[in-house]
Image (cartoon, coloured by chain):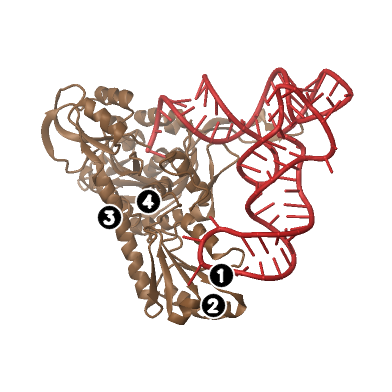
Chain colours: A brown, B red
Amino acid sequence: MSKEITARSEDYSKWYNDLVLKGSLADYSAVRGCMVIKPYGYALWEGMRDVLDKKFKDTGHQNAYFPLFIPKSFLSKEAAHVEGFAKECAVVTHYRLKNDPVTGGVVVDPEAKLEEELIVRPTSETIIWNTYKDWIQSYRDLPLLINQWANVVRWEMRTRLFLRTAEFLWQEGHTAHATAAEAIAETTQMLDIYADFAENYMAMPVIKGVKSPSERFAGAVDTYCIEALMQDGKALQAGTSHFLGQNFAKAFDVKFSNKENKLDYVWATSWGVSTRLVGALVMAHSDDDGLILPPRIAPLQVVIVPIYKGDEQKAKIDEKVLAIVAELKQAGIRVKYDDSDNQRPGWKFAEYEMKGVPVRIAIGARDLENNVAEVARRDTKLKTSLSLDGLTSQISALLEEIQQQMFDKALAYRDSHITPADTFEEFERLLDEKGGFISAHWDGTAETEEQIKDRTKATIRCIPLNNPQENGTCILTGKPSVQRVLFARAY
RNA sequence: CGGGGCGUAGCGUAGCCCGGUUAUCGCGCCUGCUUUGGGAGCAGGAGGUCGCAAGUUCGAAUCUUGCCGCCCCGACCA
């Protein structure tokens, strides 16, 4: 039916791009590596933001805002942190332009060179910890629970809409605690919030786990993550939560007096999710006809399309539909009545399917006579005729059912794509032929992990929380191992 | 940074090898009429520095040189 979208089976990457571009989520911009997030795509992000923001506030966090620019010297204070981000930082060197008499354009004014260059934040640990130093003196100032919604810049070589762009939007939580145990509890609490959000709002099952040392955030003691599986069998890190230990407290000299009046460094966490979630959402559920959005996060949950001949019929349908719209809105359902006469019904059907609106209601003269409406669900494409009496409660129930079934479907796919492998040959074969997560023994060394990555492009996505302990031998080296870890090719 | 591709109307394209009327076609857009239960039909119309610059030529979208931009594949990464 869809004449514009590349089939998944033909070219998965192209399919993804088609969905993002033709679903009006985003566009390429005039700036290399940077995208324009269009209203529909931004509405998705806003929906995610609103839900998460509430969860953050419900757990005692407050929003604040820190500068976009970070003095260069800040970045070099935590060794691992510099190492991790140095290669992808945008640097501001000047603060003024001037007219170029030769070309008539503008040039950087060489007179206006900054004393100290500024880094456009790739993440805000450094500027924030530099600030926390002034905010924290005593255990009474702790815990300090701050989040910020911001843009960050990481100068990527290669970009993909939403999944990896030079600039992206995210939230970054930065907390300070009196004890390690409290900071670790915060780290896992936030991970749980992310997992809950991914599963219950995005209908996207995730595996909670810990990163291997080489995949760990630069500057963290432990990096926890939620890993999701896309329809092409590749994994995607959907969120991270870091236990930073006292690394940043030491780097920025953030000490507090405890109850015994002794000075100690505070314990830290940071955690974030980004607009990458929009890409994850697209790839987790959609099909060859367009986006499929889970009702709880869909900007528009129900669209109503009138079908009529002549103004007289239209007026009758309007009257009925406006009442339905009012009732749906009353029930908290995001609904749109598309009675524009620019396009015919068939065009609208295809368009809203492309945009992933969970439920479409079509009402025509024939339906009015029978007191029914044609209700079509996007995820299964099934159409049913529902009575206009009690329509609102039926739609509410349908939206819940869609939400649940989308999750169940994604979960069944994910669970059937966690495959154990006991030999390296099997490991390679599974990666190439089946994809998904491969559960395999690993000797725990970075060298082995690196070799496996070089040979197969698969990385350790995570060591699942509560991972069953099981003696075995490393898939590559044959050395002893006490547990299986999850490998996958990843975005 | 290496390899590949592309730049012609809002979008997608033909023309380029082999220079020569008014730059092709489709979608979209505007006007009117007919339509409306799966991307409507007819008629009329608007819209172009052929990426930029220099060169060759009587004449350049087309040939030459230089530049710019974006996309895709790789290394790097959320």
Q: Which mark sits nearer the N-terminus, 4 or 1?
A: 4
Please give the residue where the numbered disc 2 appears in the rendered image.
Answer: A318
Question: Which amino acid is tagged 2?
Answer: Asp
Work out how far the residue at label 4 is from the one at label 2, CA to CA, in angstroms. Answer: 33 Å
Q: Name the residue under label 3.
A: A408
Q: Name the residue under label 1.
A: A339
Q: Nearer the viewer, residue B33 or A269?
A: B33
* Number of other residues with Cα within 10 Å of mark 2, as a class: few under 14, some 14 to 19, many 20 or more: some
Q: Residue at x 67, y 31 (%)?
A: A109
- In terms of depth relative to the viewer, which is nearer, A208 or A314? A314
The answer to whether residue A183 of the structure is visible from this angle is no
Task: From the viewer's perspective, tell me whether residue A114 is left or right of residue A404.
Answer: right
Q: How far apart are marks 1 and 3 (CA)?
A: 34 Å
Q: Do the residues labelled 1 and 2 touch (CB within 8 Å)?
A: yes
Q: Which amino acid does label 1 sit on?
A: Asp
Q: Which chain carries label 2?
A: A
